[in-house]
Image (tube, coloured by chain):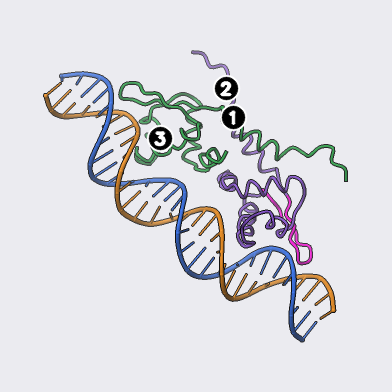
Chain colours: A green, B purple, C orange, D blue
Amino acid sequence: MNLLFKALRDPTRRRILEMLKTRDLTVGEISDAFAMTTPSISYHLDLLKHAQLVSARKNGQFVTYSLETTVLDESLGWILDLIKKPKGKRK
Amino acid sequence: MNLLFKALRDPTRRRILEMLKTRDLTVGEISDAFAMTTPSISYHLDLLKHAQLVSARKNGQFVTYSLETTVLDESLGWILDLIKKPKGKRK
DNA sequence: TGCACACTTAGATAGTTGTCTAATTATACA
DNA sequence: TGTATAATTAGACAACTATCTAAGTGTGCA
């Protein structure tokens, strides 16, 4: 939960997730979309991986990243729980 | 969006939101629940207020905070959009 | 075998964050 | 009026974060 919200905190990382929604991408492809060095992107990808928001597979020289949505269910539940009115509450 | 995720990043702030789900609370009541000074709690409340996750009303010497869930819809939408399968995608 | 390319790791650094103590503001009430 | 209580503001500081450059690792291919 902590790792998840930590990962979602950063705009660059959120945009990476949005990009991966469309299709899997290599580090280079992701990197090209940002005005930022590849090591910096690598750092963000690592952080996303630790939060289990993405997975990586190696293909020759390339590393392809995929979006992993399972862990998002948790955050969804937490937010929904906050939004929903407490029921059966008598004044 | 940025302010929102920034606010949700911190465990103390998330717990404050959970507390406010049950009922409105004064700064003192919130502060009592944490091993942390009142100024620190005040700092967190201010941050939550800027993210529009809480609102504050003054009652004499006391300031009572309430949960505001409207802004959470936005994050909910963002996460849901990430989770949902892109439809009509032909391979 | 060795060079080029894709990516990660390491180390440095400026900026941000969460916490504290001390000082300030504002209200209640004797 | 003056003192106590509730909360915020200010200033300091250690820890964390996002970024960079430089160096390292691993794969492809001439």
Mark 2 in CB contact with mark 3 (< 8 angstroms): no
For badge 2, the amino acid type reads: Lys
Q: Main secondary structure of the magenta part?
A: strand
Q: Is residue A31 magenta?
A: no
Near mark 1 (Cα within 10 A), the count class, few <14, some 14-19 or many ≥20, is: few
| Residue lying farthest to the top in this orientation | B91
State the separation of the CA atoms marked 3 and 1.
21 Å
Q: Which residue is mark 3?
A: A33
Horizontal side of A90 relative to A71 (left or right) equals: right
Which mark is on residue B81?
A: 1
Image spot of residue A40 (x, y percent): 38, 41
Disc 1 marks which amino acid? Asp
The residue identified by callout 2 is: B85
Using the image, name the chain to which the residue with label 3 belongs. A
Q: What is the x, y in percent for residue C12?
A: 30, 53
Task: Identify the residue shown where x is 61% and y is 35%.
Answer: A75
What residue is at 73 percent from the left and 45 percent from the top? Answer: B21
Q: Position of residue B50 (x, y in %)?
A: 62, 53
| C21 horizontally vs B58: left or right | left
Query: Which residues fall within the magenta stretch?
Result: B53-66
Question: Which of the chains bears the disc numbered 2?
Answer: B
- Which amino acid lies under the numbered mark 3 shown in the image of this protein? Ala
Please state, as top left, top right, bottom left or bottom right, where the N terminus of chain B lies in the image.
top right
The quadrant in which residue B46 appears is bottom right
Residue under disc 2 on the same chain as residue under disc 3: no
Judge whether residue B54 is colored magenta.
yes
Q: Which mark is residue A6?
A: none
Q: Is residue A31 above or below residue B44?
A: above
**Residue B59, how many percent across, how many down?**
78, 62
